[in-house]
Image: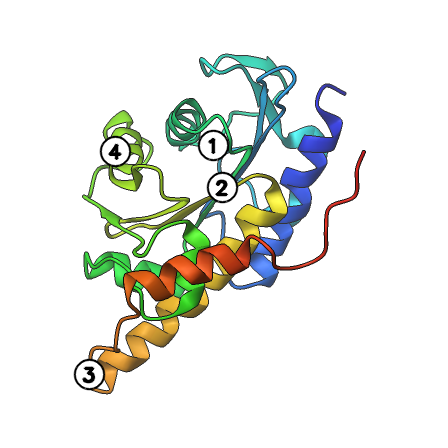
Amino acid sequence: MLLERERCLVAQFGRELVRAGLTAGTGGNLSVRDPATGYIAVSPSGMGYDAVTAADAVVVAPDGSVVDGTRRPTSELAMHLGFYAARPDRHAAVHTHSPAATALACLRRPLPAMSYLVALSGRDTVPCAPYADFGSQALADAAVRTADGCDAVLLASHGLLCLGADMDAAFQLAVQLEFCADVYLRCLAAGAEPAPLTKEQMRRARERFGRYGQPKKET
């Protein structure tokens, strides 16, 4: 099977999306890019995540043409392709319809530096892209343009998209930003805007995250 490892990751983390409460039904989508070939394994359109197997994931070329697979690729394929073209250093994307991040996106508000965890996105603020029809090239263009190098972007009245060097990084970013969005909304519901961290505090957080966790093993 072409890109078997990447297709297995798409199936595995699709199930994780549901278990983590980051989507409902068939909402959201995922992809993993193989740096060696440039081919991308993407989730199939309109299938329940618990039913998706590695064979259901679709392999596409950078131009979106199907290289291997029998399913129709995700309706947000253009958005995934757009981000990979703009960010050659990122090899996985996770698009969620998680409740708190989506609520914030419905308010058309960015996620500010209310927690050091926002620094995981690579920026002080996670921006919110303007609304465009789902699955459209307009949405893909708006998302890439608004992200402007950030590893995450809110999609107005839609959801959240996160990038990572690998699937685990993209997924964990989505988890952490959903937590931050939930806390931010709770602060707003309490009637107050949370105190923002300074640019210097966020810079130090990003620096410390660069040393966080266990060292990666040489392969």
Residue 204 placement, left or right of 42: left
- Picture quadrant of residue 188: bottom left
Instruction: Name above or below for residue 167 compared with residue 171.
Output: above
Q: Which residue is mark 2?
A: 29
Can residue 177 be seen here? The reply is no
Marks 3 and 4 in Cβ contact (< 8 Å): no
Q: Earlier in the sequence, mark 1 or mark 2?
A: 2
Q: Which residue is mark 3?
A: 192
Q: Earlier in the sequence, mark 3 or mark 4?
A: 4
- The amino acid beneath tag 4 is Arg
- The amino acid beneath tag 2 is Asn
Labels 2, 3: front one = 3
Could you tell me how far apart the alpha carbons at marks 4 and 2 are, in whole angstroms?
20 Å
- The amino acid beneath tag 3 is Ala
Q: Which residue is mark 4?
A: 145
Residue 61 placement, left or right of 76: right
Could you tell me how far apart the alpha carbons at marks 1 and 2 are, in whole angstroms?
7 Å
Can residue 116 be seen here? The reply is yes
* Number of residues whose C-alpha sits closer than 10 Å to that of mark 3, classed few (under 14), some (14–19) or many (20 or more): few
Q: Which mark is residue 74?
A: 1
